[in-house]
Amino acid sequence: MVQEKRINVGLIGCGNIGAGGHLPAYAHIPEAELVAVCDVAEELAQAAAERSGATAYTDYRRLLERKDIEMVDLCVPTYLHAQLAVEAMRAGKNVLCEKPMAHILKAADAMIEAAQANGVKLMIGQVRRFDHRYASIKAQIDAGKVGRPVFIRRAERQFLPFPPEAWQWDPKRGGGVILDIGVHATDLFRWLFDEGATEVYAVARSVRKAAREAGSFDHAMITCKFPGGRVGFAEASWAYPQGFGGTLYAQLDVVGTKGKIQYADKDTNPMLTYTTEKGHELPRYFRFMSTTEYAFEEEIRYFVRCILEDQEPFVSPQDARAALEMALAAQRSAEEGRPVPLPLKKGGEDD
Ligand SMILES: NC(=O)c1ccc[n+]([C@@H]2O[C@H](COP(=O)([O-])OP(=O)(O)OC[C@H]3O[C@@H](n4cnc5c(N)ncnc54)[C@H](O)[C@@H]3O)[C@@H](O)[C@H]2O)c1
């Protein structure tokens, strides 16, 4: 029997999404073997090692020294993405890195350069693209079902349970809700419209005490202009009341010249497509599922296959950089109270 090709993976960051979303996915991906896990918090590294059978590390440099590791899965806080990704790529590893790509554009550019200089693959985990709900919407748009999409309305609403000192609230380490959640929306807009934005305008607030104390935004309304008068509008929020209906409540409406697709997590008919030809249709039944149930597995399996088959991922580092640039423009817009044109100026504060 021919032995299936497999690659060895090291997971760095065993917190919320590393241990909760990525680690369990490896049990379902036969092409990948999780051989090493790392966290500066020793108890988290040990717990991840016990669950997976991998070797635990507290210093990521020891993990990167291992020659048998071909892929590194980075689930560390956002402000550390670029530093660890660049070191991993210099050590010859292919890197799957959580979103947002980085906290500033200069860091994102360093990641792109390191991937090119070291001949390795880099993919940012824009996980919504691997979520079958949004992939189905994208397929319906590409099939011309609703004509040319002209308006997209998105909402991602959460309650964030962390204390004010958590990195997520810190404008410098996590970027607040605009970078952390808004980047899912900016990437969705670019993907579904299939082009880049020209201008971003955002109004944002610090609603919860934790956001006010940390000096970051936890609620944002982001309007993104696209060529030809197309518009993407997103509500990104961590300010919803605890237990209001799950950890994440998402909605997406795509309005096209010949129809509309609407999706809402919590509705009885969560997805509905309206076309001028056929009226309303339920294209498929979608039970409510959280992204962690399957989309991380799809994302990781896809990247592993890209490595094994030497294919460039369809979510390019440039795509992730562009989504980050839009989120940074939204941040600037909310701070300054004015629309911000894209691309952002080189050498500016966000660079
Ligand atoms: N795709 C999604 O839907 C999604 C969801 C949640 C988080 N994320 C992203 O994942 C990343 C991690 O978020 P999280 O919620 O898991 O955060 P977290 O704080 O729960 O986990 C991060 C872990 O990294 C560890 N760490 C920090 N520095 C380290 C280092 N130098 N070496 C090794 N480990 C180190 C921390 O100890 C912590 O356990 C963030 O960039 C976040 O934006 C993505």
Image (cartoon, rainbow, N blue to C red):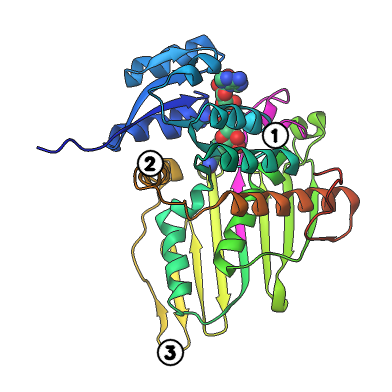
- The answer to which quarter of the image holds residue 83 is top right
Please state the horizontal and vertical placement of residue 4, each as a whole percent of the image: 21, 38
Q: Amino acid at mark 3?
A: Glu
> Residues under labels 2 and 1: Cα distance?
27 Å
Q: Position of residue 274 (x, y in %)?
A: 46, 79
Q: CA distance from mark 3 to mark 2?
A: 41 Å
Residue under circle 1?
174
Q: Secondary structure at mark 3?
A: loop
Q: Are marks 3 and 1 in contact (CB under 8 Å)?
A: no
Q: Is mark 2 within 8 Å of ligand 1?
A: no
Select label 3 or label 1 by which is in front: 1
Amino acid beneath label 2: Val
For image coordinates 43% across by 72% down, the residue present is: 140
Q: Is residue 159 left or right of residue 70?
A: right
Cα separation between marks 3 and 1? 46 Å
Q: Point out which mark residue 223 bears.
A: none
For residue 273: magenta? Answer: no
Left or right side of 87 for 259 = left
Q: Which residue is mark 2?
A: 304
What residue is shown at x 50% (from left), y 36% (from top)?
Answer: 95
Q: Quadrant of the C terminus?
A: top right
Quadrant hosting ligand 1: top right
The residue to which callout 3 is attached is 277
Q: Does residue 62 lie above or below 4 as drawn?
A: above
Residue extending farthest to the left is 1
Question: Tag 2, which secondary structure?
Answer: helix
In this rendering, does residue 307 appear at all?
yes
Residue span colored magenta: 154-173
Question: Against 257, is 181 above or below?
Answer: above
Percent of width and height locating residue 53: 32, 17
Which is in the foreground here, disc 2 or disc 1? Answer: 2
Report the residue at 52% width, 12% height from top: 58
